[in-house]
Amino acid sequence: MKKLPDQIIRISIIFTALILFTIVIRVFIIPEDLKEKGIFRTSAIKQELAKEIHYAGSEICVDCHEEQYDAKHNGYHKELSCEVCHGPSYEHSEEPDDATPEAPRKRKFCPVCHTYNLSRPTGFPQINPFAHNPLEPCINCHEPHDPRPLETPKECAGCHRSIATTLAVSPHVKLECITCHNTPEDHKINPRIVRPGKPTESKFCGKCHADGSSNREAPKIDISVHGENGEKYLCWQCHYPHLPEVD
Amino acid sequence: MNIASAHEGLTKLLEQVSGFIYPNEIEVHWSILIVVYPYLTGLVAGAFILASLVKVFNVTALKPTYRLALLTALAFLLIAPLPLLLHLGHPLRSWQIFFTPNFSSAMAMFGFVYAWYLMVVLLLEIWFDYRADLVNWGQTAKFPLNWFYRILSLFSKDVSPQAIAFDNKAVKFITLLGIPSAFILHGYVGFLFGSIKANPWWSSVLIPIVFLFSAIVSGIALVMLLYMVITPSRGKPIDMKCLDKVASFLLYAAIVDFSLEILDITHRLYESEESIKIITEMVVNKLFISLVVLQLLIGMVVPLGILIATKLANFNQELRKLLYFLAAILIQIGIFSTRWNVVLGGQMFSKSFRGLISYRMEMFGQEGFLMALTLLVVPFFILALLIKLLPPWGSTETLE
């Protein structure tokens, strides 16, 4: 057999030493808790458990603050946790006298959630903080734990601002919401439970748009042929009803 | 902290946001350090490819840059993992990562790719190439340097023609192995981004290849710059034949890179996926300077023009040097912008496709501008040290 070149032997020694070194580190120096469960460091659980607790959760407050709890429980803010507004209160709930949570009484607080923002879900109560009763703290008029509207918003726009503003610049601007949505009064009080109607078939639009309709302003089409022969699609699959466009 | 006081901080942050974003997108997590990381590894891969041209493809004109390119690759490779470790936040704990490898994590693969490239490719190649010199210096240098060289040479003494012939064979073999390895090293970095399905700016099979060629461009340009600075400072004349050759390769690589980049852009525009609107908006509003001006115009079109001009026209040596120098600097700016645009661009638009986010760079701090600058400068000091200890213009020629 040919003798291995001298260089290869020397390099091999180095690599063997490195491999041994790795094994030694793996076996003796890497802490046990890094090896027990794959890549998960088991002592991390203990470490997390040892952390100081800041939040008490929303159930414990009821023990001492029944009034606020009950108010909130049935109101519009029922899905907010107390600590969303009052901050972490674990210490307070253990020793009420040692630490009192802050109450956000200033006006700038509520708009964190209630400022008008297009991306909020439809129907979410939103205001423009510059225009809505400026300068006065919100809690002068709204009880924070049960913020029922002082009076039922008269306009649909109060809750459906983005649809209303869209409609206002569309060819349908002259149509009222209720022309197309049969809306019970109770919708304005319990909007998620009492739902208004929505048009369900193309014939509805045809009332104004079909050839021979009595509406004088609406452009006419032959609903039996228009839009892929009328059967396959509803009108609003092609025309957004709040901003109908033809191009 | 309750949300009343969080509110103020949040409002400040919200100024950096336009449109709708998801809550976890407000912070740009991959900061400038993650920009530096692919830039550094790119330089390594590129410099190595330049070196391999000499050994594998026998481009003898490039010989004066061979060892310089290897040392450059090493100097930058040593620093390449640092941005990652600093970004992870506990650099002193990083050794645990290396010794508890996670085979299923694409991120963790860097450890393997890196170890392979450093130990099996770069160090071995340098060792074989310098071995005869090391033996020689081990005898001629003064104490304690002579011991340093002896240890580096692993106490080998054999400088017989057979041994040197074996060294050369080994170097050639390792370089052959090294080309795919360098491709893997930087292709891998591109793969990391390209394989992120959820992010349309990154998710593209072209990304690893674009990364690779931009790496080659930046690496060649860097070695060219270094060669043009170091040689005159030693009082030696610049070998114009070599420099012209480097510039040619730089031009070829840049042409391929540019075509790939244009291909990538065309592809995106033609595909016009749902993300195209927000991406266009991002490019126009957030990345205009860094992408259109720096990356494409100043960093690519202008240097390409310069390099083509030097090929077509008959400029004299001095003008050529000046132009090469300028082109190489512009290319560095361009490739750095490329990394910037890829890494930060991917985090500047919301995955809802309805909002944009800004990146505000810190000045100080572990992920700040100064740290990034340090990481970019340190390799040059390491290189200076390497050059001092292992002069690339060593004594092999005389020995041969």
Image (cartoon, coloured by chain):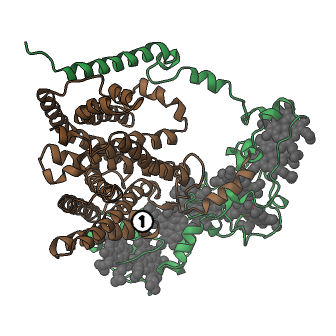
Chain colours: A green, B brown
User: How many marks are shown on the rendered structure?
Assistant: 1
Q: Up-down: is B219 above or below A93?
A: below
- Residue B118: image location, x then y, percent: 32, 34
Tell me the quarter of the picture where residue B400 sits.
top left
At label 1, the amino acid type is Ser
Tell me the quarter of the picture where residue B147 sits.
top left
Which residue is found at the position 55% from the left and 78% from the top? A168
Towards the viewer: B96 or B173 = B173
Farthest-out residue, left: A1
Q: Up-down: is B27 above or below B15?
A: above
User: Callout 1: helix, strand or loop?
Assistant: helix
Residue corresponding to mark 1: B290
Tell me the quarter of the picture where residue B75 sits.
top left
Which quadrant holds the N terminus of chain B?
top right
- Residue B18: image location, x then y, percent: 54, 64
Q: Is residue B39 visible?
A: yes
Drawn side of residue A42 relative to residue A127, left or right? left
